[in-house]
Amino acid sequence: MIEEFHLPDLGEGLADAEIVQWLVAPGDTVTLNQTLAEVETAKAVVELPSPYDGTVKTLHAEAGDTVDVGAPLIAFDVAGGESDAAAKAPDATSTAAAADSEEKTPPNLVGYGAAPSSKSRPMRRARRAARGPAVADTAVLEAAPHDVLPETPTSVRVGERPRSTPPVRAYAKRLGVDLVLVAAEVGDRVVTREDIDAYAERVGVSAEAPAVSTPQSSVFGESAERETRIPIRGVRKHTAAAMVHSAFTAPHVTTFHTVDVTATMDLIANLRADKSLAEHRIGPLVIVAKAVCLALSRTPGLNSRWDEEAGEIVQPHYVDLGIAAATERGLIVPNIRGADRMTVPQLADALGALTATARSGKTSAADLAGGTFSITNIGVFGIDAGTPILPPGQSGILAVGAVRRMPWEYRGEIALRQVMTLSLSFDHRIVDGAEGARFVKDVADILNEPGRAMLLG
């Protein structure tokens, strides 16, 4: 019999996901929990396991399509259905069993989130007006020509993506038509291709010659595109919204401090030469992470969050250390849970696992939530200093610059020393200048003279 599998809620109330790639095709035989596809949400890339043993019948979406939670994703031909005889002459028992079968839902597998309570399409959560996408959508509506908008109000909710199918969204994109404006005309129903055609004709958009980019002759006489349009979605879309929200909510202050880290680099060289530590990759970022955890014990404001609704400052008694990671899909900040309770080798192992997972695109949504303080290593790009933006919900983030050999005053003389710049951004609602300066000084003192960690640990 045919079983339809609908896209499940992948956690935190996310409304949709993009198909990154299918790992199966129609006709393939699959087993329970075999990975069917990779999908990208606003949080991370997630693997979808199969809820059935059977044969793939139909794929309802293609790679690159965005699928709503609750929408059909894939159909299976599952063995073990009713016999022909039972189907021809059902009795009361078989009829009841059939009814139960119709109401049966796929297994609630690990990673799928909560099991749906009904077969109806889940309602989307309205986005808060203070967040980036809602502000952007409002700006689009307000900036549109007056004759584009309907004369009477509709039930379209600003901040929510218009309801449409992937082919219709692709068609609107090719024409350069904004679905928000079309949805404002059609009301609270699914936008169709005919709606887009009618809108395009009225505003003078040609369906025959959509111009996403304009060709231009290159210096070699060949045709070249003047611009490339990249859809804003997935991790990058979520990051952009979060950064805008953070930048315009928390008053950012950044302070800088340059420190001689020669002693730390000597310590790292000695640790790497120790055969008992050979399996642990200990580098400058690991030592900085340890120094940060120790310094936070003296400046708890930097490990706090602002709770606007409760009117409180919340100070966790633990450190979930976020490490900013640049990936092909954009910037993410996964967390090392309980970093303050880890030794240097344990931190090295956790950092290595976190980095490998992030680069492979397998970071889970749970690992991206709930950090209390973050570090961004801009030194790997050869950058000395910067003004990092706070991850939402955190009151501090430390940018670690490149280690450089340069002339430096040392014991009353000028010598070539290894130097690093620390850049701390903090939420001035929670942290005042003195506390921010004390934190940076504590981290710098440990990096300048690692033995000082004994005074804080």
Image (cartoon, helix red, strand yellow):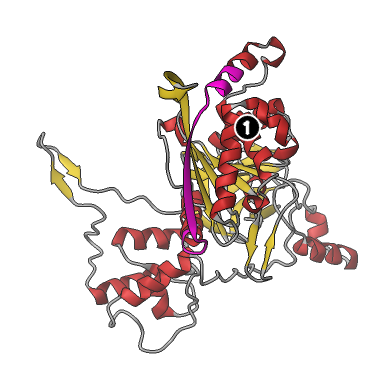
Within 10 angstroms of label 1, few (less than 14), some, or many (20 or more) residues?
A: many
Write down the residue under mark 1.
Answer: 351
**Occupied quadrant, residue 147:** bottom left
Q: Residue at x 64, y 53 (%)?
A: 301
**Occupied quadrant, residue 449:** top right
**Occupied quadrant, residue 266:** top right
Front residue of 151/416: it is 416
Quadrant (top left/top right/bottom left/bottom right) for the C terminus: top right
Picture coordinates of residue 102 (x, y %)? 75, 63
Residue with the most extreme bottom position: 152
- What amino acid is at disc 1? Leu
Q: Residue at x 61, y 38 (%)?
A: 442
Per the rendered image, the range of residues in magenta is 247-268
Q: How many marks?
A: 1
Picture coordinates of residue 421 (x, y %)? 46, 35
Picture coordinates of residue 325 (x, y %)? 52, 39
Task: Tell me: residue 355, above or below residue 102.
Answer: above
